[in-house]
Image (cartoon, rainbow, N blue to C red):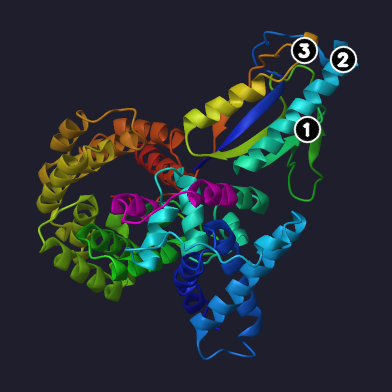
């Protein structure tokens, strides 16, 4: 059975229930039940109309749950009442669901969890495993998020930037569990791009595809990080790159630049270089200038300093780095790299070791420690 | 979305403000303290921020490899060991500020006289997975 197909039906089925008057939280539970039922029943007895089957089963589950709830409250008369029309109107069903799950009243971790469940159709257990928290904790996080948004009335589109931020987090901050969060983020962004025509949605999709294309080259067989310059470019997924570049070019042609398009442009320039030495660094610096102008982000300034170091030499890079807040994560690692390029292995080794102590992830810490050790060994201890 | 460890020490942390050993509290004070800790964990489960909580026995053993074919060497416990961990709680929160807030609440657990202990807790961030987008 095609699990992705099944999960791709989730938002549409959920929207039907809500449109029929089911409250969001109960409808979402009912859809999850229907998905589990489908996994059980479909392999032996596949329905002809998959979505219709899910709607029927989910609606029945919803009514059962409501009846049980009403019985518990001894108010059986409620059961026969027709529900009031739901909040869906004027906005595409699927789009409505994206906006709801990324609503600004939610914290980012809640928005991520709710999006993965209600839009992505993942189970609470899968999401809990992906984020390394107990299933009970994730269940509470999701049910709180559902309570938070259950009063929200969305009759016109929200801010697409909030949705994109949630999808970006799913793509960028996952662990490697049995759920491939990066692939899931791409699927959800692709689905979003089908229902809303917006250059930044395209920009984010392109950004994801271009980074995902390098995945096989990004880690060595032992799990250690391989920096961009040392990656085996033959391992890059050329189809994903071609798709990402195509989407990006179409988006840029519309002349409504945004941060995701600018980041994707940087990734596309890297993808375009057959060898690391052939990277068009001057143009990458220009894109970082755009990005700094758009966002003012300190991380963009830091990355710009690296690009300046490549385009104009390590001294220029260090000068650019001097303008960046030194407290920023990875600042010391960038300083170490630029000093190494500048032919100062003693300073570089010291800074690599310091950067390793401040690294935010184990893989980066190991990588930086190794760089320090190599430089120290080459200098004779 | 970041995990933090709240570390509680038997020894090694600065002295608490309300620094009376637990065996000198009244039984009601001990019970109130236990109830507070329990409620705190339960509340974090409800907010979807709880990951783990464990307590450790104070007596431990140091162990090390002693060469091929030989059993590991054990030593200790050492009374002079400066740092002695009593237990921990792992939380998964949206910000460092939220982690500080929760650590502050945990440190306010009642002790002698029913007053907050003001115990020093150590807050340590977990190392995460590396991000996908790096440039």
Front-most of residues B52 and A354: B52
Could you tell me residue A314's position as x and y percent?
Answer: 17, 39
- What numbered label is drawn on residue A171? none
Whether residue A225 appears in this view of the structure is: no
Towards the viewer: A322 or A103: A103
Q: Tell me if B113 is positioned left or right of A379 in this view.
A: right
Badge 1: how crowded within 10 Å, few (<14), some, or many (20+)?
some
Observer-side mark, 1 or 3, equals 3
The residues tagged by marks 2 and 1 sit, at their Cα atoms, a distance apart of: 18 Å
* Front in this rendered view, residue A58 or B6: A58
Quadrant of the snapshot with the C terminus of chain A = top left
Say if the magenta span includes residue A144.
yes
Question: Do marks 1 and 3 both belong to one polypeptide chain?
Answer: yes
Q: How busy is the neighbourhood of tag 2: few (under 14 within 10 Å), some, or many (20 plus)?
A: few
Whichever of callouts 1 and 3 sits on the residue coming sooner in the sequence is 1
Q: In this view, does A196 lie to the left or right of A220?
A: left
Residue A198 x/y as whole percent: 22, 61
Are discs 2 and 1 less than 8 Å apart at CB? no
Do marks 2 and 1 both belong to one polypeptide chain? yes
Could one spot residue B125 in this view of the protein?
A: yes
Q: Mark 1 points at which residue?
A: B56
Name the residue carrying label 3: B114
Q: Is mark 1 on a helix, strand or loop?
A: loop
| Residue A240, above or below A360 | below
Q: What stretch is highlighted in magenta?
A: A141-167
Residue A272 pos. (x, y %): 18, 65
Cα–Cα gap, marks 2 and 3: 14 Å
Residue name at image x 59 percent, y 51 percent: A143
């Amino acid at each position: 059975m095609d699990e992705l197909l099944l999960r791709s039906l989730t938002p549409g089925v959920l929207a039907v229930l809500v449109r029929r008057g089911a409250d969001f939280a109960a409808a979402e539970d009912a859809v999850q039940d229907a998905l589990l039922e489908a996994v059980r029943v479909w392999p032996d007895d596949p329905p002809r109309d998959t979505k219709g089957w899910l709607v029927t089963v989910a609606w029945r589950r919803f009514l059962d749950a409501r009846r049980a709830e009403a019985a518990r409250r001894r108010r059986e008369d409620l059961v026969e009442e027709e529900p009031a029309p739901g909040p869906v109107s004027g906005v595409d069903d699927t789009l409505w669901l994206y906006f709801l799950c990324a609503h600004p009243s939610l914290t980012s971790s809640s928005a991520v969890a709710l999006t993965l469940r209600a839009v992505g159709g993942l189970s609470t257990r899968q999401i809990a495993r992906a984020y390394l928290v107990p299933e009970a904790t994730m269940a509470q996080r999701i049910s709180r998020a559902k309570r938070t948004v259950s009063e929200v009335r969305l009759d016109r589109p929200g801010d697409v930037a909030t949705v994109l931020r949630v999808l970006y987090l799913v793509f960028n901050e996952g662990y490697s569990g049995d759920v491939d969060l990066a692939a899931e983020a791409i699927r959800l962004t692709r689905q979003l791009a089908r229902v809303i025509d917006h250059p930044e949605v395209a920009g984010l999709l392109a950004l994801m595809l271009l980074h995902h294309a390098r995945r096989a080259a990004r880690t060595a067989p032992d799990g250690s990080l391989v920096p961009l310059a040392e990656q085996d470019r033959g391992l890059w997924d050329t189809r994903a790159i071609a798709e990402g570049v195509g989407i990006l070019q179409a988006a840029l042609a519309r002349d409504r630049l945004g941060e995701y398009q600018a980041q994707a442009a940087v990734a596309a320039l890297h993808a375009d270089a057959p060898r690391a030495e052939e990277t068009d660094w001057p143009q990458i610096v220009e894109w970082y200038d755009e990005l700094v102008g758009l966002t003012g982000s300190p991380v963009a300034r830091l990355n710009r300093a690296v690009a300046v170091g490549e385009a104009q030499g390590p001294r220029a890079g260090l000068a650019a780095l001097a303008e960046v807040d030194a407290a920023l994560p990875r600042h010391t690692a960038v300083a170490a790299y630029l000093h190494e390029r500048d032919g100062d292995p003693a300073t570089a080794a010291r800074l690599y070791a310091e950067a390793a102590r401040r690294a935010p992830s184990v893989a980066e810490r190991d990588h930086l420690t190794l760089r320090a050790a190599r430089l120290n060994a080459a200098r004779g201890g | 979305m970041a995990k933090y460890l709240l570390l509680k020490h038997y020894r090694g942390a600065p002295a608490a403000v309300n620094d009376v050993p637990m065996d000198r509290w009244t039984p009601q004070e001990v019970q109130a303290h236990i109830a507070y800790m329990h409620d705190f964990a339960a509340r974090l489960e409800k907010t979807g921020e709880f990951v783990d909580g464990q307590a450790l026995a104070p007596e431990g053993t140091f162990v090390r490899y002693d060469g091929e074919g030989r059993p590991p060497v054990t030593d200790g416990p050492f009374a002079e060991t400066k740092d002695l961990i009593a237990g921990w709680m792992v939380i998964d929160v949206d910000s460092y500020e939220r982690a500080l807030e929760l650590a502050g609440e945990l440190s306010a657990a009642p002790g002698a006289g029913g007053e907050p202990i003001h115990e020093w807790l150590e807050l340590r961030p977990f190392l995460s997975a590396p991000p996908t987008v790096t440039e």
